[in-house]
Image (spheres, rainbow, N blue to C red):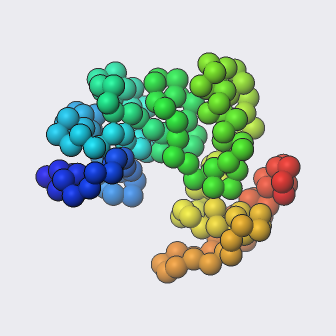
Amino acid sequence: QHYQYISERTSLPIILYNVPSRTGMNVLPETAIKINETCKNVVAIKEASGNISQIAHLLAIKNNSFEVISGNDDQTIPIMALGGVGVISVYSNAFPKELKEITTAMQKNELQQAQVLNQKYLKMMSLLFEETSPAPLKFVLNKLGICQNILRLPLAPVSKQTENRLLNELEKYEKY
């Protein structure tokens, strides 16, 4: 009923967001499909459950009017390999070119190239979640000159230890 209520009040396309780690609820594949069938403007799901088996099942049973998008940077390759169409990314806020290289390689069926790039960038992808998001990302964006490292409560700046790990990894990037 929740999604139907929202769907009836807009003509805009809607993307479901399955992020059990933040909501305490998991949108099962059958539920996502039912929502898509009931609410025609629900066109996709950002899948951040981390459960590749569940995502593979969703991709196997979905219809052509419903897309699956990775919600975890480090799962972009497996989700795209299974038929997902891309990623809604945290990492790309700081490193759009680098993530585009991975998704472009996947779109061109250049799996080996995508794997090499993923391995190159995986450490930073992981570090961006070492502490509560978006604190690590804000720290990196500040170092890149994109924004100030100001967080609203209850969020707090990252620890000095995480700062040092982020800075060490950031040194490997060209634009820094």
**x then y, percent, for residue 6:** 22, 56
Q: Which residue is drawn at 39% across and 33% down?
A: 67
Foreground of the two, 132 or 69? 69
Q: Quadrant of the C terminus?
A: bottom right
Residue 164 position within the rendered picture, expressed as x and y whole percent measured from the top left:
78, 64
Residue farthest bottom in this picture: 153
> Looking at the image, can residue 115 be seen?
no
Q: Which residue corresponds to the image point at 62% horizontal and 19% vertical from the top-left? A: 109
In depth, the one of 93 and 77 nearer the eye is: 93
Q: Residue at x 74, y 59 (%)?
A: 166
Residue at the location (46% across, 30% down)?
84
166 in relation to 117, above or below: below
Query: Residue 145 appears in which quarter of the rendering?
Result: bottom right
**71 versus 127 height, above or below:** above
- Of residues 175 and 43, the one nearer the viewer is 43
Q: Where is residue 146 shown, x and y percent of the image?
A: 72, 67
